[in-house]
Structures are given as C-alpha cells and as structure tokens.
Amino acid sequence: MKLTDEEKKIAVETSQRILADYTSNKGVLIPVLQHIQKELGYVPPPAMEIVATHFDIPKVDVYSIVTFYNQFRLTPPGKNQIKVCMGTACHMRGGTIIMDSWKRRLEIDCGETTEDREFSLERVACVGCCTQAPVTVINEEIHPKVTPTRVDGLLLSYQLDKDKEAKKAGEDN
Amino acid sequence: MNSTSTTYAAKFEQLKEQSEACWNALKEKPLIMVGAATCGRAAGALEIIETFKNELANRQIDANVIEVGCMGHCYAEPMVIIQKPGHSAICYGYVSEGLASMLVREFVAGDDPCIEFALAALEINDFIPTFEDFPRGMVEKKIVMEHCGLINPEDIRHYIANGGYEALAQAVHKPGNEIISTIKSSGLRGRGGAGFPTGIKWETCRRAKGETKYVICNADEGDPGAFMDRTILESNPHQVLEGLALAARAVGATKGYIYIRAEYPLAVKRIETAITQAKEAGLLGNSILGSDFDLELEVFQGSGAFVCGEESALIASMEGEPGIPRHRPPFPAESGLWGNPTVINNVKTLSYIPHIVRKGADWFKETGTPDSPGTAIFALAGKVINTGLAEVPMGTTLSQIIYDVGSGIDGGKQFKAVQIGGPSGGCLPETFLDTPIDFDSLRQAGAMMGSGGMVVMDEDDCMVEIARYFLDFTQKESCGKCTFCRLGTKQMLDILERITKRQGKPEDIDTLFYLAENVKIGSLCNLGKTAPNPVLSTLRHFRDEYQAHIDEGRCPGLMCMDFIAYYILPDKCERSCDACVGSCPVESIFSNEDRIKVIDQEKCVKCNSCMDACPPQYSAIVKLSPPELVKERENG
C-alpha cells in the first residue's frame, strides 16, 4: 500500500513530537513504537527512520522489532478494526467459521484493509474471553458468541450508524 | 505526632483504620457490586451498571453501585452481588437489564430477594444455599482469588480493609533473608508452568553480585485458552503489587516492572491505577511507610510475541531487542535485565506471596500435596457447562475439575479429551481423568501444568485438527533462532495440514514421530522443546483418529471441512419452516418439489449456520463424513 504525501507528513511530525518526550536509552524503543502506533494506528517507514536516528541504531534494527512483534502494523488500519479471536476456545467453537464469514462479507483477506479504508481484518491469538467464545473485537468492543448471521448484523449496524451520521451531517449543513 | 515516633506499624494502622471505615460505610447502604472484568464487560456488564444507576435514580434510592472484578463464574456473566443490611449478600447470575430493574424494585426498594434468580448466597443463611453447598464450592479452595470479584479493584482501601498490604507493612523492617526462608520453607513453586521453587530463585538473586537488582512480574499471558492472569490483574491488582514489593524487599531490588501484554488494556489500566494509589498511600515509591525501603514500579507493555513469556526473551524485549531467548545459564537471577540480577515471577506466584508472608509457611503447606503445596488456578473453557476460573488445591483430580467445578459436558455429549497447558501441553483422554493435578503427575502423563489453561473437548472435536491448531500457533510464534524449532515445526505443520485436507499419506504418522523427537532435542527454549507435545499426545492417545483421516477419508469428530458435508434429513425436515434458508449466507438451500429443503453442495461453504438455525424439535441437519455419503443418501 502506497502512502500519500499527506500521510508521510503526518507520520514524520507525529513521530518527532512523540520522540521529544523520550530518552535515547534503548529500553524505551518498544514503548516509543507502541506510542507511535497508538497515535497513527500503524508504524510507517518514515516513522521508523526517525526512530532509528533518535536511538542512533541502524534502520534495520527498528524494522526487525516492528516485524518481530505481532502488535505492530506496517499498513494503515481501517476506520473500524475487526479482530477475530483465534484462541483455543474460540477455535473450537467455530472461530475459523467466523473468520471466513468476515472475509466473505468484507471481501478481504486476514491482515488487509478494505478499498474504502472502512474496515481492516486481523486475527488475534486470545483476548482472554474464552468463556464467551467465539469472540470478535471491533474497535476495543468485545462481541461475544458471534455467529455468521451476527457478522451480517454487526456490519448492518455499522452501515446504519454511518448512514445516520451522514444524514445528521447533511442536516447540520 | 512527629515523624521519629511514628513507627511503620503505626503508619499502617492508620491507613488500615481509614480503609476499614470506608469499607464499612459502603455496607451501611444497600451495596450493588457488578462484575466488570473483561469477561463481564463482553457479556454487557457496563450496560447493567447503567441500568442499576438509572433505576436507583428514578426511584430516588440511596445505594452504592461499584464495579468489582471476576469471581471466576464466567459462565454466568454478567454477575451481580447485592448486599443489603439485614440480608446475607446474594449473588445473581445472567443478569439482564430487565432483571436489574426488577432487583432494584423488588429487593433494594422492597424486601423480596428474588431467590429464584439467585445463584448462591455468600454467607450462611436460612433461605439460599451458599457457594460452598454446591459440588464446585466443595472442591474449590480460594487463596489468591479469595477477594476477586468482592472488592473494587480500583480502590486500594478495599484491599487494605481485607488484610491487604499487612504483609508488606510487616516486611519493611524484616531482613530479606527472613522473607526468603519463609518462602523457601513454604515450598512455593513458580506458577508460570515450569514449577521452579520460588524461594531458591530469590535466594540466587539475593546472593548474586551487583548493586542494582530488578524484580519483574511476568504477565505476558500468551497461551490461547488461558485467562487466569488477566482475571487476577483485573480483579485484585494490589495483591500482585504487594507480592512484587515483597519480592523486591527479599532480594534487595529497588526497581520493578510489570510486563503485561498489550492485548489486555483493562488489566494495564487497573495496574497503573493501583500503582498510583499505592504510591499516594506511601506503600510504594521512596521510603515505604517511612522505612529505608524504596521501590519504583512501572508497567511495560508486551507487544504480542508468545515467546516473550520465556524469561530471557522477555528481558530481550525490555532491552529493545527482538524477543529471542538466549542460552541459560547464566540465569536471569544472576544476570538478567541490563546484565543485573533479576527475579521474574508469574502473576499467580506473586499473588501467593502476601498470604504466605502473613500467615506463614506451615499454613500454606496445609493445602495441596507435599511436593506441590498450595492451590492450582485453572481457566476452564471449551465444552463444559460452567466455564470460568477455578482455584483448587493441588492434587485435585481432573474429573473433579471437569465434572464438579465445570458441571460436566455441555449438551449431554460424550467427553473425549482435556487439553492442559496450552500449546506446550497435551491432550489427555478419559483414562487419565483420575490423574491428580500437580506439576509432576501431569508431566508424567504427557501433559504439563503450563500456566493453567484447561480446554475440554467432546465427541465433536477432531484431535488431528486440535494438534494442527496448536502446532500452527507455535510454528508462527517460533522466534526462528533454532533450526529445528523454525523448520521442524513447519514440516510437521505441513504434514498435519495435508492430513486435515484429505491428502494424508500412510507414512505420515512415522514421520511426525521422527520430527517431533528431533524438534524436542534440537531446541534451546521451552517453546521448541514442548512444541511437539500436542502432536505426540494426540498420536499416543488418539492414533485411530489419525488413521481414519488417512486411510478411511473420514473425520470422526466431523470437524475438518474437507471431510464433511451438511445434509438435511428429508424425514425430519418440517416443510413449512424456512429457518435454514434464511440463515444461509450463500443461498445454497432450496426447496425441492416436496417442499423439503435441500443443500446445494456446490455452493455450501460449511459455515454451520443452518445447523444452528434448524429448530431443535426437528434437528434435521446433520454432518456426514466422508462427504460422498450425501450422494449415496440422495440417490438411495
């Protein structure tokens, strides 16, 4: 996915602002990257370059951290982040079936973002809600006992919310 | 009072008095406690809290509504405890917004405790049985989880009023050696999985040379299917902090970290709140309770790498490196974070410490077995009726946990296996149900304690698929350092994937054994050493299932997609019911000339929706394996 100039600019400015509060002790490298991801939603190449300069380490070292840990993403996330839990309990209660439903409905594969950047789909190892399996997390909100029809319902409710917002925005203007 | 005359004990007494006053004041009014750990929130606890508050406001009733953690009865979430002066505290499960309004109306405003909706009472009374009266209560013994779900985790005073920080107040003037000898004689073993004696670890660290020492709480709970650490952190964070502070006092550390995985945002928030509160109360920070003991605690968020649960990988990640384990010795207790002696203990291990320091080693040894004293905490999930968290004495048998605590298998199905220890553990069949739970017995049986995830499987689960699932997990999480772990697990996974996709070969089973042995020998850390366990244990106990996949083209658990087909039994289908048609996401179900529903096998994506949708009185939809059976049935 190619970044726009605007996205690059935001990445550079945000990273510089964040780094101003941190020392260059390597122990804070991961917290810095976490902070950047928290604000930007992902860790783009321009941000990694600035981080490498700040800590005075090769760029590839930052890249190796970002790619080693599952938490970091290299591409911008969708507006709504859908995380399907693939823990043991969810797996046994049909986590794969739920993942398939999301893929089918959003027409993207796991790890991708929809064309309109509305939704991104990810798998998570376990969110620790094994008793409510299978679980899908949408923007930090946990949805328990998901079924393929519930997937349709959730998407519909997001569409309705969006329509409502659009209508409201139309009225406000 | 001047500072010289104030002893530590007096300072703490003052704190305790204030806390008890606050705690008792809470109970003067009706008190409504809503379980709002992550599991409760997923089931809608926050909406329930709102309902209670609105209903109380509408009726102008003066009552306290507080958020508490999780009692471990996760199956009944959202859970609510109502304590009204003059009544025993009563616990309600499966609370809906309607029930919440009713409880306010009938019980808080009126005087009817609605016992038909009660799960149990917390104190003995004449009307409602207590938790101890149920089989689960008889098996369970709570030490670490004693106050989980009964106090507000975001209020330090609740913890102090219930005996919290007393051990720390005693320990600030005790020499570290004394704490270590108590822990050593208690026989406490690390609850992270390996079961290493905690006291010996601490002693090594205390004796190690170095001015700076660190203590780290390992809360990087990465096992899929385990949520004990999350629940403890969310329900009683101060207990963990007190344990960590005692560890620091014992080994002589002044800086500590709590390493929590970032996937647990609520746990991170509650621990951070707890640290701030403890600092304000003078129980952390510089000169704790006015003594010469300083301790700075900080949260470090793990970035989602399973291997970081291994202590040397955890240290590497805190140093800003990829989480790759290194050779041990030297052990972290001698040379850990930034080369300094470091004690790393699991959340559960640390949670026992305040209790042991306060009540003594002999008290701790009364519970459990001689070699594994204390309790075991298990996250019970999968196909049991009552899922949740159970704390039982070590030595309890597997069947007691599954049938007494978990109330048996869901839906009247047949028990098949129990998976213990997550991706490093194994699957044990019915013949092992009498195995007592302790570190050594489980290892002998071919499973392991692990961190305590226990997933129960019934006749509908395919053991080959389960083995593939766990290996897929470890293979992805392998850090890549050791060749056998990196490539050997990949080869094994390829074979298992082939088997579950109907491409198994007769020689596959032997190759799996051969690879498994080599991965075990050729890996440095426990991730690789234990990665073949799920495969080995299923091969040992369920070889017939592997054979059915390879030789007969059949999946006995009816789970592997390529081995099954959905079929509607014509004699059971109710002709005028369209439930399945509406549920199908790909419109593969149609009515034939007799108005009986038929599945178009070409279109079917095997999503199971129709099976869920078919009303139970018909149960017309079945899975057939091998899928060719559908043609036979349709033609015959």
Image (tube, rainbow, N blue to C red):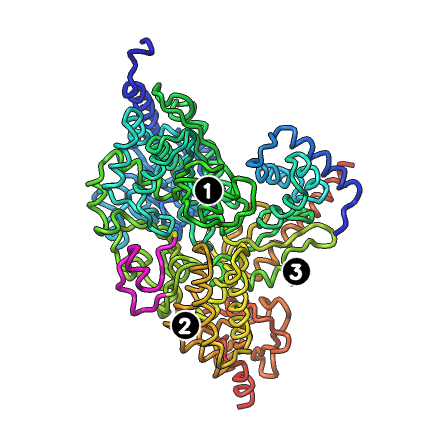
| Farthest residue, direction top | B2
According to the picture, the residue beneath numbered tag 2 turns out to be: B539
Residue B388 seen in this snapshot: no
Task: Specify the subunit that label 3 lies on.
Answer: A
Q: Name the residue at 27% across, 62% down.
A: B435
How many residues crowd around disc 3 within 10 Å: few (fewer than 14), some, or many (20 or more)? some
Type of amino acid under label 2:
Leu
| Farthest residue, direction bottom | B636
Query: What secondary structure is marked by label 1?
Result: helix
Query: What secondary structure is marked by label 2?
Result: helix
Type of amino acid under label 3:
Asp
Distance in Å between CA atoms under marks 3 and 2 = 33 Å
Task: Specify the subunit that label 1 lies on.
Answer: B
According to the picture, the residue beneath numbered tag 1 turns out to be: B48
Q: Which residues are magenta?
A: B428-450
How many residues crowd around disc 1 within 10 Å: few (fewer than 14), some, or many (20 or more)? many
Q: Position of residue A125 (x, y in %)?
A: 52, 54
Residue B582 vertical placement versus B123 (above, below)? below
Q: How many marks?
A: 3
State the mark number for residue A109.
3
Type of amino acid under label 1:
Ile
Residue B472 vertical placement versus B19 (above, below)? below
Q: Is residue B439 magenta?
A: yes
Which-is-in-front pick, marks 1 and 2? 2
Q: Position of residue B347 (x, y in %)?
A: 39, 42
